[in-house]
């Protein structure tokens, strides 16, 4: 237990901040994922064959390739791509991009593929009459989308989105390979310097369990709120 | 785009795929037995047994696979007692540690899939069996299990694909599976995009095959909702 003391003696404070880092990366990745979903869901539902193929390619490739491989692509490829762009503008020094950004971005792309599928499913299960009725009533396009379709879509999407959240939260453990100090990385460091891996990895497991448990409680409450009247 | 590198790395990655497939098949088979066992425990009326099975699946589904591998590979070796038993022969090999972690993990997910499949079996089938005087054991093996397998095929197909991606974590405990070799080639050549395309292509090909086998089985055994 001494190992968990806060301050210089133990690893309590380090692990606490690492947990905050995990939460921060998960939330950022989730938001980036929503942005990707906002782009790719319309593509997947588009009747244009070309756009449709792009949308399908995104979800198929990302969901069919291991997360770790995607992370390596961005970890090793990210700074290279940026350096290439910079070299066009005549800047030739080495650029290292922030581990937080690469991590969130690569997890975000993965989580975005799952979110896209969830939103697509939710949109498709909204009753056709709702679309027709709002067209007949002559709503403006954005009113029709934001006031009628979006709220219904969210209600249908929330249960599955909480699954996506769980996946995203657990996937953030993988970006420890890039050196970002989140729960796994911090446990790795602590295990290495105290030679007590069993304790620290088990404690990491407890931290993840707590995160999943409390976020599920929160999301279940949200689900109930959106399902009022159903 | 370095086409030559892509062609040169292809055979290396392909031979690493064998390890990936080995890890996948062994852990899926072990996981299926673990999953079936825990699914049966979950349906037990004894509250304690039920809670234990639920706790197992909650523990393994609520924590990342990476933590599970690290606990088994780095953590268990720390227990002095284990080093004296024959278990140490197994636990000092990263290959077996990865298999243990994968099997326990997929076992937890499989138990959930099978449990919900067992629960969706119409009570009429069981009642029909009972009224025909079929012994309980035979009802279970000849009626419940075949129906449950049918019901759980689509979800189990997803689980196979998730596990295929999960085997990539074996590379974190020094195993040279497909992802491990891909990482090695990336870090020696600094050509991530080319290697990603080849390795990702192999993974996609495998998911494609799994997807189609499951689709075929679903059709053959007539999946009804």
Image (cartoon, coloured by chain):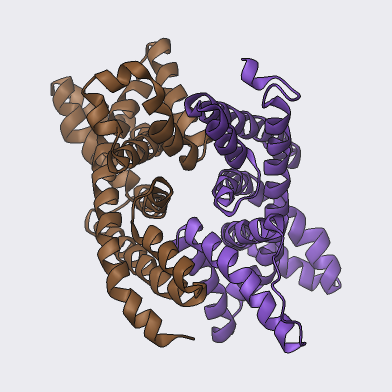
Image location (x, y in percent) of residue A160: 59, 48
Q: Which hue is chain B drawn in?
A: brown
Residue B54 seen from this side:
yes
- Quadrant for the N terminus of chain A in the image: top right
Image location (x, y in percent) of residue A152: 72, 54
Q: Is B11 located above or below residue B139 in the figure?
A: below
Q: How many marks?
A: 0
Instruction: Judge by depth and name the residue closer to the eye, A19 or A223.
Output: A19
Residue shown at 38%/11% (left/top)? Answer: B46
Q: Tell me if A122 is positioned left or right of A196 in this view.
A: right
Chain with purple colouring: A
Image location (x, y in percent) of residue B195: 44, 73
Image location (x, y in percent) of residue B100: 32, 36
Name the image quarter holding residue A75: bottom right
Residue shown at 55%/60% (left/top)? Answer: A71
Name the image quarter holding residue A193: top right
Instruction: Judge by depth and name the residue closer to the eye, A129 or B93.
Output: B93
- Quadrant for the C terminus of chain A in the image: top right
Residue shown at 33%/33% (left/top)? Answer: B118
Residue A126 seen from this side:
no
Instruction: Judge by depth and name the residue closer to the eye, B147 or B10.
Output: B10
Q: Tell me if A108 is positioned left or right of B141 in this view.
A: right
Q: Tell me if B75 is positioned left or right of A182 in this view.
A: left
Instruction: Judge by depth and name the residue closer to the eye, B211 or A109.
Output: A109
Name the image quarter holding residue B184: bottom left
């Amino acid at each position: 237990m001494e190992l968990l003391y806060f301050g210089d003696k133990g690893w309590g404070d380090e692990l606490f901040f690492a947990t905050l880092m995990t939460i921060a990366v998960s939330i950022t990745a989730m938001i980036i994922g929503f942005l990707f979903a906002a782009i790719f869901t319309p593509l997947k539902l588009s009747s244009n064959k070309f756009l449709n193929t792009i949308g399908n390619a995104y979800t198929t490739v990302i969901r069919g390739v291991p997360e770790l491989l995607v992370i390596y692509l961005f970890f090793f490829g990210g700074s290279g791509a940026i350096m290439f762009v910079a070299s066009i503008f005549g800047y030739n020094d080495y650029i290292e991009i922030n581990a937080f950004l690469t991590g969130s971005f690569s997890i975000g792309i993965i989580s975005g593929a799952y979110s896209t599928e969830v939103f697509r499913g939710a949109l498709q299960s909204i009753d056709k009459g709702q679309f027709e009725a709002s067209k007949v009533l002559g709503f403006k396009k954005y009113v029709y989308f934001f006031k009628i379709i979006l709220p219904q879509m969210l209600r249908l999407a929330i249960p599955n989105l909480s699954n996506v959240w769980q996946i995203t939260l657990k996937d953030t453990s993988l970006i420890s390979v890039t050196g970002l100090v989140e729960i796994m990385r911090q446990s790795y460091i602590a295990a290495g310097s105290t030679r007590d891996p069993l304790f620290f990895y088990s404690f990491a497991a407890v931290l993840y369990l707590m995160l999943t448990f409390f976020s599920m409680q929160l999301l279940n409450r949200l689900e109930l709120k959106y399902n009022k009247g159903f | 785009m370095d086409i030559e590198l892509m062609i040169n790395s292809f055979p290396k990655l392909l031979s690493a795929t064998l390890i990936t497939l080995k890890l996948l098949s062994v852990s899926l088979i072990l996981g299926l037995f673990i999953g079936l066992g825990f699914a049966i425990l979950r349906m037990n009326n004894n509250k304690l047994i039920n809670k234990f099975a639920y706790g197992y699946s909650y523990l393994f589904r609520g924590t990342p696979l990476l933590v599970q591998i690290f606990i088994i590979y780095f953590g268990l070796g720390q227990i002095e007692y284990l080093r004296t038993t024959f278990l140490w022969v197994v636990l000092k090999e990263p290959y077996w540690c990865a298999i243990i972690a994968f099997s326990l993990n997929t076992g937890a997910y499989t138990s959930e899939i099978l449990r919900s499949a067992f629960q969706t079996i119409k009570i009429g089938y069981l009642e029909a069996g009972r009224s025909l005087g079929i012994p309980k054991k035979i009802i279970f093996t000849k009626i419940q299990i075949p129906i449950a397998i049918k019901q759980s095929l689509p979800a189990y197909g997803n689980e196979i694909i998730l596990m295929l991606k999960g085997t990539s974590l074996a590379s974190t405990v020094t195993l040279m599976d497909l992802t491990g070799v891909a990482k090695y080639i990336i870090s020696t050549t600094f050509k991530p995009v080319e290697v990603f395309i080849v390795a990702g292509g192999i993974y996609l090909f495998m998911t494609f095959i799994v997807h189609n086998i499951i689709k075929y089985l679903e059709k053959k055994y007539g999946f009804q909702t």
